[in-house]
Amino acid sequence: MNRDQQNESDADHQMPSWHEVFLYFLFLGFVNIGGPVAQITMMFNHMVEKRRWLSKDRFVKIMAFCHMLPGPEALQLAIYVGYLKRKVWGGILAGLTFILPGAAVMIVLSWFYVKCGKLPQVNNALYVLKPAVLGIIAAGIIKLGRASIRNFFLATLVVGAFAGMRFAGINFLLILLIAKKNCADTAAGGWGTGSDASITRFSMAPSRLAIS
């Protein structure tokens, strides 16, 4: 095992305190703007790059698993990481602190918009915020893409999935099934080594995420 692999293995075993889990997800609940891409990117920055609660490979696996589940993937990822680090109560705590602050902020901002939404100052502020939020989302896509796309085969899947949905109108569930079959064929053919192979194995057996 080389140094990078050892560092990633050590990161998977980092155990944050209850205090850290509570404060981080409470903070994230107040600033989780930009939708799931921006939210997951913020989690990646904190959990992988800053605090090293998880290795990059493990985070990508969890992210892929949450994307296949119905419901908001950023919330699912928060709950899973909370459970992974602090078991059932950690998952509950992560979920509640992720949801409640954002809900409170949304209620306040909705009331404010109903009362003041027609004012020119408010419309101007929203007009300026739109490209800023788009920039945050674009930066998140680039960062998560670099973490997830590690070889030519995975890059081909990304391009094929985009083309299928954008130009051919193929349902995303069918695209997932096609991607899974291609990953299975690739694994059977012996393609991929190291972390790439582990991603391929995960795509075929997400139920083993907790022990992989």
Image (spheres, rainbow, N blue to C red):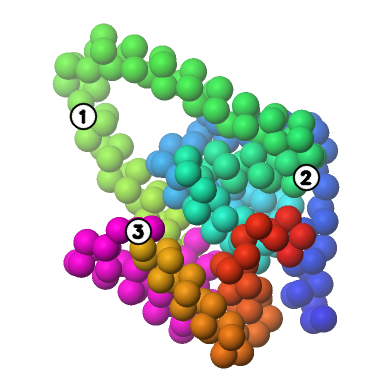
Q: Nearer the viewer, mark 3 or mark 2?
A: 3
Q: Which residue is mark 2?
A: 85
User: Does residue 18 appear left or right of residue 145 in this picture?
Assistant: right
* Relative vertical location of residue 179 with respect to residue 95 in this rendering, above or below: below
Residue 124: assigned label: 1
Give the spatial CA distance, label 2 vs label 1.
43 Å
Magenta region: which residues? Answer: 144-173
Binning the other alpha carbons within 10 Å of mark 1 as few (below 14), some (14 to 19) or many (20 upward) gives: few
User: Does residue 177 appear left or right of residue 84 in this picture?
Assistant: left
Is residue 41 in view from this perspective? no
Q: Of the residues shown, which amino acid type is indicated by label 3?
A: Phe
Q: Of the residues shown, which amino acid type is indicated by label 2?
A: Lys
Q: Name the foreground residue: 182 vs 74.
A: 182
Q: Position of residue 174 (x, y in %)?
A: 36, 63
Q: Earlier in the sequence, mark 2 or mark 1?
A: 2
* Relative vertical location of residue 196 with respect to residue 56 in this rendering, above or below: below
Q: Name the foreground residue: 161 vs 205.
A: 205
Q: Earlier in the sequence, mark 3 or mark 2?
A: 2
* Relative vertical location of residue 5 with respect to residue 118 in this rendering, above or below: below
Binning the other alpha carbons within 10 Å of mark 3 as few (below 14), some (14 to 19) or many (20 upward) gives: few
Residue 172: assigned label: 3
Name which quarter of the figure residue 159 lies in: bottom left
The residue lying at 76 percent from left, 74 percent from top is 5
**Quarter containing the C terminus:** bottom right
